Image (cartoon, helix red, strand yellow):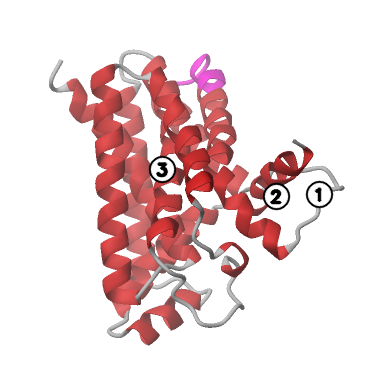
């Protein structure tokens, strides 16, 4: 039990800015096994976002509460996944070959594709969450609690079907770049789908469907352009799946 708890803390420390106990040992082999708990980290990030939204909504309009909730989740992760999305936009948008794309993605500077992609992504999140909270706070709270774990499961799914694209070990995500075992994928899947119980059956089906579509589309894109995935690709997958879940919930409402 202590070993699994240590892996959970390692996942929290690697994939967020949240504090963990000092006794945690960040050995490279443990970093690789900790990826199974990435959706569980999403529980914490979703809870931070939901709590921030609920508190802000008691005093402020919905749109401002949404902005504060988004800011809280970004602060909690250090914009880890948003940075991956921007780098992936730059790499796939500006690179003609695999080598060019990987070199661009490794550059710390943000380019036109990354800047435009990041602005559009944040705008889409804001609009989707604001629409979900137009009449009631619960849909926003449920959306945050569901989207963060489920979207991280999409990233783990990409790890399960693709190899790491970089041949060097200098990237930040190199220590976790290994295919999860069937047991590890099962743990991640369970942690990712349990929050769907917070949604109506139609909303849950829509959220799960769009997550699967994003994971498959992302894996196909990364395999074709890069021959595998990078840490930035995982961040991009998480961000795409997150906004897709919000939109899926809104689309489900059109059938009720």
- Residue 150, position in %: x, y? 42, 38
Tell me the residue at 46%/61% (across/down). 84
The extreme front residue here reads 182
> Could you tell me if the residues under marks 1 and 2 are in contact, i.e. CB atoms within 8 Å?
yes
- Quarter residue 94 falls in: bottom left
Query: Image height check: is 245 above or below 167?
Result: above
Q: Where is mark 1, residue-wise?
A: 24
Q: Which residue is mark 3?
A: 151
Q: Quadrant of residue 92?
A: bottom left
Direction from residue 26 to residue 58 in the image, left or right? left
Front in this rendered view, residue 228 or 185: 185
Does 119 appear above or below 150?
Answer: below
Mark 3 vs mark 1, foreground winner is 1
Q: Is residue 204 left or right of residue 157?
A: left
Q: Position of residue 236 (x, y in %)?
A: 40, 57
The reply to whether residue 130 is in sight is yes
What's drawn in magenta, residue-wise? 54-62
Sooner in the amino-acid sequence: mark 3 or mark 1: 1
Q: Quadrant of the N terminus?
A: top right
Density class for disc 3 (Cα within 10 Å; few <14, some 14-19, many ≥20) is: many
Outermost residue on the right side: it is 23
60 inside magenta stretch: yes
């Amino acid at each position: 039990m202590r070993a699994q708890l240590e892996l959970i803390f390692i996942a929290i420390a690697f994939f967020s800015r949240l504090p963990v106990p000092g006794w945690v040992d960040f050995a490279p082999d443990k970093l690789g096994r900790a990826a199974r708990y990435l959706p569980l980290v999403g529980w914490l990030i979703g809870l931070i976002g939901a709590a921030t939204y609920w508190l802000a909504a008691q005093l402020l309009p919905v749109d401002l509460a949404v902005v504060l909730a988004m800011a809280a989740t970004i602060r909690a992760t250090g914009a880890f996944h948003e940075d991956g999305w921007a780098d992936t936009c730059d790499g796939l948008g500006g690179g003609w070959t695999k080598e060019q794309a990987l070199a661009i993605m490794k550059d710390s500077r943000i380019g036109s594709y990354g800047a435009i992609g990041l602005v559009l992504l944040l705008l889409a999140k804001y609009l989707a969450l604001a629409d979900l909270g137009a009449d009631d706070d619960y849909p926003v709270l449920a959306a945050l609690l569901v989207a963060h774990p489920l979207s991280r499961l999409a990233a783990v799914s990409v790890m399960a079907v693709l190899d790491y694209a970089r041949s060097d070990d200098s990237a930040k995500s190199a220590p976790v770049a290994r295919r999860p075992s069937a047991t590890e994928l099962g743990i991640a899947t369970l942690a990712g789908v349990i929050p769907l119980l917070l949604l109506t059956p139609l909303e849950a089906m829509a959220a799960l469907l769009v997550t699967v579509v994003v994971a498959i589309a992302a894996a196909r894109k990364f395999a074709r352009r890069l021959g595998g995935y990078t840490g930035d690709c995982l961040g991009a997958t998480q961000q795409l799946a997150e906004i897709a879940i919000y939109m899926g919930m809104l689309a489900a409402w059109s059938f009720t």
